Image (spheres, grey):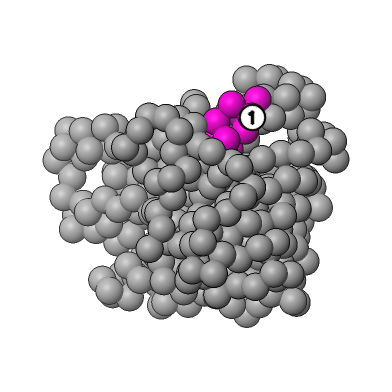
Amino acid sequence: MSIGLRRVIEPAGVLPQAAWKLDADPRIAPDEVRIRVQRLNLDAASYRQLAQKHAGDGAAIRAEVLEIVGTRGKMHNPVTGSGGMLIGVVDEVGPESPLAVKPGDRVATLVSLTLTPLRITDGLAGWDGLSEQVPAEGTAILFGRSVVGVLPGDLAPELALAVYDVCGAPALTDRVVRANRAATVAVLGGAGKSGSLTLAAARRAGARTKAVVLNEAERDALREAGLADEIAIADARDPVAVSEAVGEPADVTVVCVDVPGCEHGAILATAAGGTVIFFSMATSFPAAALGAEGLAADVTMLVGNGFVPGHADFAVDLLRQVPAVRALFEARIAAD
């Protein structure tokens, strides 16, 4: 099954995600699929880095995204190493493609833009650079081993894209909670997209939920949603503050904060023998590994890789079944 090696330009011999540059030629191989792009969703860590670098200047952010895609043949932020995902319409399906899509299907790619050959043809003229969701025209290529989902008819495309962007977090949390019979789950960044879905998943799996948020506005929104049994305010980059905010260490701690420096707080907040799930592209493996060693912390640490079988359907079902989660997502989209 194709993993896209023919699309790698440099360096030779690596997989598309690790490549510096991909060939985004819209002509497909027999086992590829071409998507007509309609909207990109930049991952939170990548967009935050770009926004901070350019001091919120939308035109400069847009120009850099165009430069990255034009240079690399994919949306792969060279600073954060992350990308995002997209929605579009299936244009052409190669005769040997194993993907269950057909021309005309409106789909979301469930693989990262960091490994998706991408061309932008409209200069991102419809995007002001001030939000993670990016109206766009162009083409994208999926390989035989890619993952793609047909958009549900009862959700607005922008809402479906936002959910699919983080659908790995709640599915993995559900798996870990059930496998370990975890009684308590702490979520750093509980008011965000992945955080709110993770809280809902943990509660549905039978765990008591604790949320750590950055400010009073996030606390109030999460309190109104009723997704967490306990809510505390702390800077996730402050290990002692996080530990104090969580109180009794959690069986499972999930990091859904899109800034660096949250590793040590998550470790301190987790009980001996517990599990930490790092579901942020801003996570540093050396900081996590060496921090746990230095704290003599007996914890299992997992890197959420964004894929769990059935993760998209799982997240959409949570959105449908828990109105409070849907309300948080819709409010965020409206604010953007």
Q: Residue 242, how many percent across, how many down?
A: 41, 42
Q: How many marks?
A: 1
- Which residue corresponds to mark 1? 70
- The residue that appears at 43% across and 45% down in the rendered structure is 6
Q: Which residues are magenta?
A: 67-76
- The residue that appears at 49% across and 57% down in the rendered structure is 143
Q: Chief secondary structure of the magenta span?
A: helix
Residue 285 lies in the magenta stretch: no
Vertically, is 269 above or below 197?
above
Q: Residue 261, how many percent across, how many down?
A: 41, 32
Q: Is residue 175 visible?
A: yes
Q: Residue 66, how many percent across, how many down?
A: 69, 30
Vertically, is 217 above or below 144?
above
- The residue that appears at 33% across and 59% down in the rendered structure is 252
Secondary structure under tag 1 reads: helix
Q: Nearer the viewer, residue 5 or 334?
A: 5
Q: Is residue 57 left or right of residue 317?
A: right
Residue 70 lies in the magenta stretch: yes
